Image: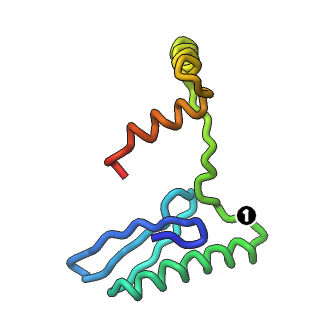
Amino acid sequence: MQYKGYVGKVEFDDESMLFHGEIIGIRDVVTFQGTTVKELEKAFKDSIDDYLAFCKKRGEEPDKPFTGKFVVRLAPELHRAAFIAAKRAGKSLNNWLSEKVERAIQGIC
């Protein structure tokens, strides 16, 4: 589920017969639940809207979903080897690493 750039993960609890969801990719805890898919979708959107309104009321910036930027720390030798491999492939280190990560996670997501 996606709404306003936020992503929700949902699980079904067969004991309570409820769908429970949580917004993933942010540090804050934002949850939602419903007994039907339609109810779950509404609760998901309402939870995000409530979260954004709550942050605004408090004068705080809401935690944002992933930006696509992150720092990776490598051993200097591995950094050098990756740089050389990227150049040999005629690519920037960023593009080369992006391709490698994408291939590594295919089938996982």
According to the picture, the residue beneath numbered tag 1 turns out to be 61
**Looking at the image, which is closer to me, 70 or 56?**
70
* 95 up-or-down from 5: above or below: above
Q: Which residue is painted at 46% across and 37% down in the image?
A: 101
Q: Is residue 75 visible to us here?
A: no
Could you say where residue 63 lies in the image, as x and y percent from the top left?
Answer: 64, 60
Residue 65: x and y in percent read 59, 58
The quarter in which the N terminus is drawn is bottom left
Residue found farthest to the right: 59
Q: Residue at x 32, y 69 (%)?
A: 11
Q: Residue furthest front?
A: 90
Alpha-carbon neighbours of circle 1 within 10 Å: few (<14), some, or many (≥20)? few
For the residue pair 108 and 103, the one nearer the viewer reads as 103
Q: Looking at numbered disc 1 in the image, what kind of residue is underneath it?
A: Glu
Is residue 7 at least partly visible in the picture? yes
Residue 97: x, y in percent? 52, 31
Image point (57%, 14%), residue name: 80
Q: Is residue 58 left or right of residue 45?
A: right
Which one is in front, 60 or 5?
Answer: 5
In the rendered image of this protein, does residue 15 appear above or below residue 107? Answer: below
Picture coordinates of residue 59, whole percent (x, y): 78, 70
Q: Is residue 23 left or right of residue 63?
A: left
Q: Residue at x 53, y 22 (%)?
A: 89
- Quarter where residue 39 is shown: bottom left
Establish if 37 lies above or below 93.
below
